[in-house]
Structure formats: structure tokens, C-alpha cells
Image (cartoon, rainbow, N blue to C red):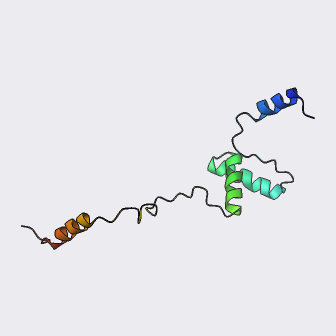
Amino acid sequence: MISSIDNECIIVYTVGMNNIQYTIRSIPPKVDQALRIKSQKTGKSLNEVVIEALTKGAGVTPDATFNDLDWFVGSTPVDAEFDEAMNWLESLPRDVN
């Protein structure tokens, strides 16, 4: 049974922990060395380098965002007046002196 004091401690302990955290044990020395060297060479923290390695190893694209217009295609209503205006514009001569 968890007492109210235990509950308070759990709440206080987890405050500010919005991200998932891991504790990884038994890191092979060669992996540790490679990660630390990369950290020093790139000027990144060891944590950043490990997250990049995990992301790449998991086959995940880190910041995959799509800034295309797929959400927009087909969302406009059919407008006969607009189509008529566009046809009129297309019928105008291209070379105006």
C-alpha cells in the first residue's frame, strides 16, 4: 500500500520530467569510447550523441516534417465563376506591347 507521503514523493520526483528517460547498462567499452569521441569532435553533449545514435539505429528520421500542400488539394469547392475567369485570362494574348 502506498502512503500519502509516498504519493507526494512520486509527484515531486516526476515534476519536470516531460520526456521519456532511459537507464542503459552494460555499454560495451568500444561503443562508449566511440560515442565520447564523437561528442568531443562535434561539440555536442554525450546525451545528444546517444540520442542521435539511437534515432539512427531505430531507423527514425529525427525531424521529419512535411511542408507540402496535401492537406489543401481537393479542399476547395468547385466554383464555376472562378473557372470562367481563369478561362478568360488564358484566352488573353501573352505578348502585350
Q: Quadrant of residue 17?
A: top right
Quadrant containing the N terminus is top right
Quadrant containing the C terminus is bottom left
Q: Image height check: is 67 above or below 8?
A: below
Q: What residue sits 68% from the left and 58% below the top? A: 55
Q: Image height check: is 85 above or below 51?
A: below
Q: Image height check: is 28 above or below 2?
A: below
19 to the left or right of 64:
right
Q: What percent of the width, then of the height, locates residue 13? A: 79, 33
Q: What percent of the width, then of the height, locates residue 60? A: 65, 61
Q: What percent of the width, then of the height, locates residue 73? A: 41, 65
66 to the left or right of 18:
left
> Which residue is at the front of the view, 40 or 68?
68
Q: What residue sits 56% from the left and 58% below the top? A: 64
Q: What percent of the width, then of the height, locates residue 67? A: 47, 58
Q: Quadrant of residue 78?
A: bottom left
Q: What residue sits 85% from the left and 51% below the top? A: 25
> Which residue is at the front of the view, 29 or 69?
69
> Which residue is at the front of the view, 23 or 46?
23
> Which residue is at the front of the view, 26 or 37?
26
